[in-house]
């Protein structure tokens, strides 16, 4: 049975300049213990999707259809109170920029204790010990001393380790990591990702890794979901996706990812931009205007709701 | 003659009583006409400080910065804008969204350096030409940054840097904020511009794949020091310094196996009052030995054209 199931989810934002159709007909499943990547350009709806799963959306957002089920619980119908029980304990999230996600005027040890106090029945006298253990677990050097440090006293990589410690403090079943290494150096990125995947394996925790870096997703994920302009355009196991991409957008993304064999001459770009999601006459396939295989039925025709959302796959 | 020669360039900041932060420590390198030099290293290694020294926004503590045989390191930063050199050394900034004034149109952004440094006689023509060079359609010139896409904003940022026809263009992570979908077009634009205008590039980036594609020579910095320098391809195929090796191995690639990766453990040493006898990479280096603690390695030639600062490479 799957841990998380999103069915037919559509979500829009009502803004002054029109309704933004941010997500449409999203279907996905996450099983226990698996690591799934969500990739796509900025603006494709990766973060909105994860916020939608946790229901931490802006008040302008409106779910127009669909369901989100986590471990049997209806996330969209649940009360705010029961959601608070789930968030941080069962599903936790690592946010993009650790420096802005941490409280700048609270010592990091106390921030971990806050999570423990909210979600666990840890005794007050054990708090400090548990917090230090959590810091040691993510390999913060000298955790006893770092316990009383403020975020500004730590490097970017260490702040991200603190974020991971916060997210994993309650042994969640699902971890959503939203661009966990953006802004970090490649060497730090490698250390952070191997830490996340090691802890995930150890705890049999399911992980959603949101990234725009296809190469990174290929290294750490079992399965990859490709998003474009609020649609999931392709879902496949990592090996299949890279060996045989079916959706033209996936193929384009792979060709535009810099790799050791790429040169400036071979590196591809993707023509055009994401369509304006405020339009009311969005074509059935939102990649239509950028696609070399596009035909008339891509605008009007219903698209297959399978793993490859394309009428003319590769 | 080289476009730029840096010799013994240092920048130290006093950060407290007796505490001196060695941001850039004794850096030497040259950039030839038409050459593009990549500058890589992790945050805090002194890349940005070095860039600010070269673009003369910051005064060096010591050393010479020589532009075409003229020492420009002695001109105080606040007076540099009034000199003949300012138009010749220009910069493309990191995030095109943050570095464009939201209340200036694309035209104004590109026109500003001309208004400040050049003649406004043919302003419209000069701006239109710069826009053409970077592939920015005329009809986008009256637009404000929020009406432009990421790639278009990047083009505006490049156009305003090349509008004065500089000799040396310093690019600070020009593609870091861009999606991969437009990255290739911007990289190709930069390669074409360099060829057509004969400019030299100092290309700062932590994306090593991008550096490899665009640069002839690469300089690797670690904690204020240059630890390795050599031809780009060679640096990737046969990195000499253990830090360069870790950097190259850390790049994710499609189909790569993270399990086979040596992950650098530990945190960098403090750049404040660094001990002169200890290698700056000591404490994180997978190959460190006792000698690295008692004698800091100097840059030496490892192979023809490749220098590295390590006792054991």
Image (cartoon, rainbow, N blue to C red):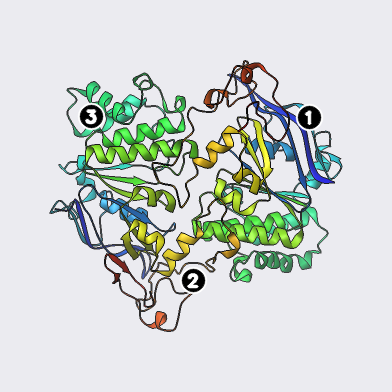
Q: Quadrant of residue A291?
A: top right
Res. A281 in view: yes
What residue is rendered at 60% in x and 21% in y?
Answer: A278
Is residue A200 positioned above or below B312 on the image? above
At mark 3, the secondary structure is helix
* Marks 2 and 1 belong to one chain: no
Is residue A199 positioned above or below B276 on the image? above
Answer whether labels 2 and 1 touch (C-beta < 8 Å).
no
Is residue A251 positioned above or below B243 on the image? above
User: Which chain does tag 1 point to?
Assistant: A
| Residue that badge 2 annotates | B284
User: Which chain does tag 2 point to?
Assistant: B
What residue is rendered at 38% in x and 72% in y?
Answer: B274
Q: Nearer the viewer, residue B76 or B300?
A: B300
Measured as percent of width and height from the top left, residue B228 is found at 34, 65
Answer whether labels 2 and 3 touch (C-beta < 8 Å).
no
Res. A41 in view: no
What residue is rendered at 53% in x and 52% in y?
Answer: B253
Q: Residues within 10 Å of mark 3 (few under 14, many from 20)?
A: few
User: Which chain does tag 3 point to?
Assistant: B
């Amino acid at each position: 049975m799957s841990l998380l199931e999103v069915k037919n989810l559509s979500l829009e934002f009502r803004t002054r300049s029109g309704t933004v159709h941010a997500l449409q007909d999203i279907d996905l499943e996450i099983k226990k213990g698996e690591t799934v990547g969500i990739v796509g350009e900025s603006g494709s709806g990766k973060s909105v999707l994860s916020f939608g799963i946790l229901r931490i959306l802006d008040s302008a957002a409106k779910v127009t259809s669909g369901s989100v089920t986590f471990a049997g619980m209806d996330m969209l119908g649940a009360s705010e109170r029961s959601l608070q029980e789930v968030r941080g304990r069962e599903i936790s999230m690592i946010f993009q920029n650790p420096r802005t996600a941490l409280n700048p005027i609270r010592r990091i040890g106390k921030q971990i204790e806050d999570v423990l106090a909210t979600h666990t029945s840890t005794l007050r006298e054990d708090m400090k010990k548990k917090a230090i253990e959590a810091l040691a677990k993510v390999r913060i050097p000298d955790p006893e001393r770092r316990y009383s440090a403020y975020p500004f006293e730590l490097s970017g990589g260490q702040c991200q380790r603190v974020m991971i410690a916060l997210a994993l403090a309650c042994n969640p079943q699902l971890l959503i990591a939203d661009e966990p290494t953006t802004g970090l150096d490649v060497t730090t990125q490698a250390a952070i990702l191997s830490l996340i995947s090691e802890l995930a394996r150890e705890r049999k925790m399911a992980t959603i890794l949101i990234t725009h870096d296809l190469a990174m997703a290929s290294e750490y994920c079992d399965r990859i979901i490709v998003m474009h302009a609020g649609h999931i355009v392709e879902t496949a196991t990592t090996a299949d996706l890279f060996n045989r991409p079916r959706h033209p957008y996936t193929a384009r993304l792979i060709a535009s990812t810099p790799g050791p064999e790429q040169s400036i001459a071979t590196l591809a770009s993707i023509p055009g931009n994401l369509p304006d999601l405020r339009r009311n006459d969005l074509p059935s396939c939102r990649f239509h205007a950028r696609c070399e295989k596009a035909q008339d039925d891509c605008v009007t025709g219903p698209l297959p709701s399978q793993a490859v959302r394309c009428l003319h796959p590769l | 003659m080289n476009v730029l020669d840096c010799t013994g360039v240092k920048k130290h900041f006093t950060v407290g009583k007796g505490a001196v932060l060695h941001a850039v420590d004794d850096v030497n390198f040259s950039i030839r006409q038409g050459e593009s030099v990549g500058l890589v290293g992790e945050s805090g290694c002194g890349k940005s400080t070095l860039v600010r020294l070269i673009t003369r926004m910051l005064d060096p503590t010591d050393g010479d910065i020589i532009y075409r045989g003229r020492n420009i390191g002695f001109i105080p930063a606040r007076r540099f804008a009034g000199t003949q050199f300012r138009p010749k050394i220009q910069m493309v900034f990191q995030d095109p969204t943050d570095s464009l004034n939201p209340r200036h149109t694309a035209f104004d952004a590109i026109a500003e350096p001309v208004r400040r440094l050049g003649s406004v006689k043919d302003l419209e023509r000069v701006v239109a030409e710069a826009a053409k060079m970077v592939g920015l359609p005329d009809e986008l010139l009256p637009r404000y940054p929020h009406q432009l896409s990421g790639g278009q904003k990047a083009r505006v940022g490049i156009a305003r840097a090349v509008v004065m026809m500089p000799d040396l263009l310093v690019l600070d992570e020009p593609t870091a904020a861009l999606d991969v979908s437009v990255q290739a077009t911007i990289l190709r634009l930069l390669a074409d511009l360099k060829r057509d205008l004969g400019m030299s590039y100092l290309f700062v980036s932590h994306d090593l794949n991008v550096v490899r594609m665009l640069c002839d020579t690469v300089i690797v910095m670690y904690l204020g020091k240059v630890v390795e320098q050599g031809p780009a391809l060679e640096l990737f195929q046969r990195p000499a310094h253990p830090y360069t090796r870790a950097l190259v191995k850390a790049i994710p690639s499609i189909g790569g196996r993270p399990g086979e990766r040596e992950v650098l453990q530990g945190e960098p040493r403090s750049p404040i009052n660094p001990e002169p006898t200890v290698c700056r990479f000591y404490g994180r280096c997978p190959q460190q030995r006792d000698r690295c603690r008692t004698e800091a390695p100097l840059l030496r030639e490892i192979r023809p054209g490749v220098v590295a600062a390590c006792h054991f490479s």
